[in-house]
């Protein structure tokens, strides 16, 4: 049992800085912390570092610990968190050391002898932009800034593209039995890829420009090559970019599907006699196909049911045997993602996906959590593992938990425990996900009400939104939300809370005197402070004030190229919301349109038209292209939302948005339907049936959103009245409330 005076000692240290009190606490618990750390990290030196870190955290968190805290339990939990982070840092350090050591032991001459015969094939396998980046960086040995300038992107974007391309080259060589580190690969390419041409070669190569006769051999080669290049263009049109594929079965199948899509885009059919292996191989090449063709392949694969899931489980097991092999990592990730596409058809894969939550690769762990979420309530056996995974992949695991068990008290308590963990900032994703656990509102509301009092403005805004959604299930949620609202101005960001209180003596004065310019000034003072790191949320908060934040443009400009992706995204978003006064940023934002990161490209396209209306059509074209890309699945709803905001200016997006109405992602259907109606109200003929269809889907995550959009259509949505009446008896309180409101908006004359 905890000694009665332990929290007294904690309070004494917090209030007076008593070293004696703190030393007493350390003496009592150091053995517990060190033993737990040693069991976890299995290395005495690292365990000592973890122990020291835990007590440093205690010293900094002492003032915030509730009096009811069981100190030994809190220390044990904190040791677990710190140990996990230490293990990840140690893994990265050893990995870098291993690569450096491999560089020293590998023999460059031998490596080049193995690489040289395959290099041209490997380079041809890269996409054009990746190939150009490698040529500039390692064939011509240009700096990253020069590579970025040549390709019209930032230095950071160039670095990411080069790293990605080198990873693809390593994988290519690995599959052909040539294992080589990234350091050695780039070194031997730089040293050997370009050699001095024979004397007189310049003159010989220039002979064709001077009208001189060519040898028959060269003339024939020129003619054949020109014909081949012409054929490639024709082939690219018919095959949507298909080049050379390995595997006759996959090649034939992809070719058949691509040609079908070219001639009959609405009637793509995959032959039913194809084996699971052939379909799987074809899916590995599906990125060269249009989205409709990709979906046809996925449907054919998913239709194999248990057989397909069993095949993917075998892929996971086989590739788990070589965890550090880049090819094996990629195969594990694909297998896990494909299982997610199968949804509830992959229930036999649940144990394999639970095991994948412990994979050494973060991407695989996150994909495993997403896939378990897509399986839904039948994956309840994964709940304990997902609760543990919150510490490693919190956003993916949190979303999966509410998809699987939205009414579980155990899940609610696990998510709330993460929010109350003082060793890390509250997760915005967990706060959002809690809005779906309405049956547990009695547990959730008090915690959120307390949490919202001591966080930055962005986090508090998310808390307020979640409380608002919980109001239908808990009357206390409204009071908690209203209690947090007055603080929004007073605590713009924690960094200048003290300054705000000093300048404006009380809450009432603050609300009366602080206009938008004052708030922006305070934000800028905080962001320019030398004693604190940039916070992405603070950067994004500037956009809230629109044109009133024009003084922030010089500060935001260099942040577009910041190495922290979240800061870059929020900087672009804020510049867009500032509007025409942010025109000095246009050059950098245009470059950001080619950034490797999808979300940055999205933010750039969205900001472009807000800053200068002459870019509206260019923005629409980029948004439509990105919306159709397979890489945009995670943010497709965002593209649809922006296209809707553009209204009739985005008519070019109508065909793509109509296709999205058949998406397997119900939320995407809702956003696409909303955008279509905003762009052209005549699209109601397809929008209303699509929203009704979502309402009828039992597995839809947010059916209340469909009801809300039907209500906004007014009398145009009258065909939905029968389905909305049925929704009034739903077990989902938020859906019931949204359906009732929608019925009133569609048909106010009748009492529904």
Image (cartoon, grey):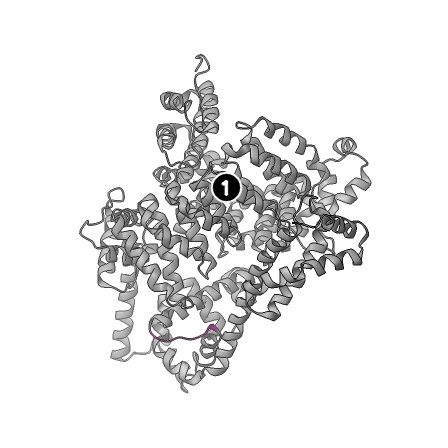
Seen at 51% across and 78% down, the residue is 101
257 displayed left or right of 486? left
Residue in front for this viewpoint, 169 or 643:
169
Q: Main secondary structure of the magenta part?
A: loop
Q: Is residue 131 magenta?
A: no
Q: Which residues are magenta?
A: 177-182
Image coordinates of residue 624 in percent, x first then y, are: 42, 45
What count of labels does the image hold? 1
Image coordinates of residue 144 in percent, x first then y, are: 54, 67
Residue in front for this viewpoint, 80 or 282:
80
The answer to whether residue 174 shows anywhere in this view is: yes
> Which part of the image, by quadrant, shows the C terminus?
top left
Q: According to the image, label 1 marks what residue?
A: 410
104 displayed left or right of 515? left
Residue in front for this viewpoint, 333 or 639:
333
Sort mark 1 into few (<14), some (14-19) or many (20+) by Cα contacts within 10 Å: some
84 displayed left or right of 509? left
Picture layout, residue 655 above or below residue 171: above
User: Hey, which residue is sitting farthest front in the picture?
Assistant: 1
Seen at 36% across and 33% down, the residue is 697
């Amino acid at each position: 049992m905890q000694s009665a005076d332990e929290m007294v000692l904690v309070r004494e240290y917090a209030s007076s800085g008593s070293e004696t009190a703190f030393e007493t606490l350390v003496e009592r618990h150091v053995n517990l912390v060190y033993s737990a750390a040693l069991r976890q990290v299995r290395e005495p030196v690292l365990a000592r570092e973890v122990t020291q870190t835990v007590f440093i955290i205690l010293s900094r968190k002492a003032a915030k610990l509730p009096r009811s805290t069981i100190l030994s339990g809190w220390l044990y939990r904190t040791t677990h968190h710190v140990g996990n982070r230490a293990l990840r840092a140690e893994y990265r350090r050893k990995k870098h050391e291993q690569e450096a050591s491999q560089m020293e032991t590998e023999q460059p001459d031998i490596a080049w002898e193995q690489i040289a015969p395959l290099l041209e094939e490997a380079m041809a396998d890269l996409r054009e932009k990746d190939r150009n980046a490698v040529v500039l960086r390692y064939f011509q040995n240009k700096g990253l800034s020069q590579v970025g300038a040549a390709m019209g992107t930032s230095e950071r974007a160039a670095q990411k593209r080069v790293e990605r391309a080198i990873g693809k080259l390593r994988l290519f060589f690995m599959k052909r039995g040539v294992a080589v580190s990234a350091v050695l690969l780039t070194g031997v390419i730089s040293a050997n890829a370009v050699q001095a041409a024979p004397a007189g070669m310049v003159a010989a190569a220039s002979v064709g420009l001077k009208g001189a006769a060519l040898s028959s051999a060269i003339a024939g080669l020129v003619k054949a090559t020109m014909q081949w290049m012409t054929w490639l263009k024709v082939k690219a049109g018919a095959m949507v970019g298909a080049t050379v594929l390995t595997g006759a079965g996959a090649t034939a199948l992809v070719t058949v599907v691509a040609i079908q899509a070219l001639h009959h885009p609405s009637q793509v059919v995959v032959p039913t006699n194809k084996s699971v292996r052939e379909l799987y191989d074809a899916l590995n090449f599906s990125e060269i196909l249009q989205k409709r063709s990709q979906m046809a392949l996925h449907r054919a694969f998913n239709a194999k049911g248990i057989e397909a899931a069993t095949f993917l489980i075998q892929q996971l097991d086989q590739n788990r045997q070589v965890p550090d092999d880049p090819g094996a990592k990629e195969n594990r990730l694909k297998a896990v993602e494909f299982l997610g596409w199968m949804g509830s058809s992959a229930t036999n894969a649940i144990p394999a996906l639970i095991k994948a939550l412990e994979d050494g690769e973060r991407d695989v762990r996150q994909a495993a959590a997403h896939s378990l979420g897509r399986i839904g309530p039948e994956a309840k056996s994964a709940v304990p593992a997902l609760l543990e995974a919150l510490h490693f992949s919190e956003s993916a695991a949190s979303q999966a938990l509410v998809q699987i068990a939205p009414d579980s008290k155990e899940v609610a308590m696990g998510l709330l425990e993460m929010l109350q963990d003082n060793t890390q900032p509250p997760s915005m994703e967990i706060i959002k996900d809690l809005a779906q656990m309405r049956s547990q509102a009695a547990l959730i509301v008090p915690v959120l009400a307390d949490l919202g009092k001591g966080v930055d403005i962005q986090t508090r805004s998310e808390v307020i939104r979640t409380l608002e959604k919980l109001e239908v299930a808990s009357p206390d949620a409204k009071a908690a939300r209203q209690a947090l609202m007055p603080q929004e101005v007073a605590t713009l960001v924690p960094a200048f809370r003290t300054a705000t209180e000093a300048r404006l003596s009380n809450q009432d004065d603050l609300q009366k005197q602080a206009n938008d310019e004052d708030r922006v000034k305070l934000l800028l003072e905080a962001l320019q402070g030398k004693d604190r790191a940039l916070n992405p949320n603070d950067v994004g908060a500037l956009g809230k004030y629109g044109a009133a934040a024009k003084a922030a443009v010089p500060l935001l400009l260099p942040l577009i190229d910041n190495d922290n992706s979240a800061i870059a995204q929020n900087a672009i978003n804020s510049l867009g919301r500032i509007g025409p006064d942010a025109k000095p940023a246009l050059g950098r934002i245009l470059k950001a349109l080619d950034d490797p990161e999808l979300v940055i490209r999205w933010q750039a396209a969205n900001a472009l038209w807000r800053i200068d209306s002459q870019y509206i059509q260019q923005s629409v074209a980029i948004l439509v292209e990105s919306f159709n890309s397979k890489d945009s699945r995670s943010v497709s709803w965002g593209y649809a939302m922006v296209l809707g905001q553009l209204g009739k200016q985005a008519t070019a997006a109508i065909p793509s948005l109509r296709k999205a109405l058949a998406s397997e992602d119900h939320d995407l259907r809702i956003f696409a339907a909303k955008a279509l109606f905003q762009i052209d109200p005549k699209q109601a003929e397809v929008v209303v049936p699509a929203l009704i269809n979502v309402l009828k889907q039992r597995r839809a995550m947010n059916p209340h959103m469909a009801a809300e959009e039907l209500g906004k259509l007014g009398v145009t949505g009258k065909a939905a009245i029968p389905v909305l009446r049925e929704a009034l008896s739903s077990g989902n309180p938020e859906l019931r409330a949204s359906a009732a409101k929608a019925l009133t908006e569609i048909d106010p004359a009748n009492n529904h």
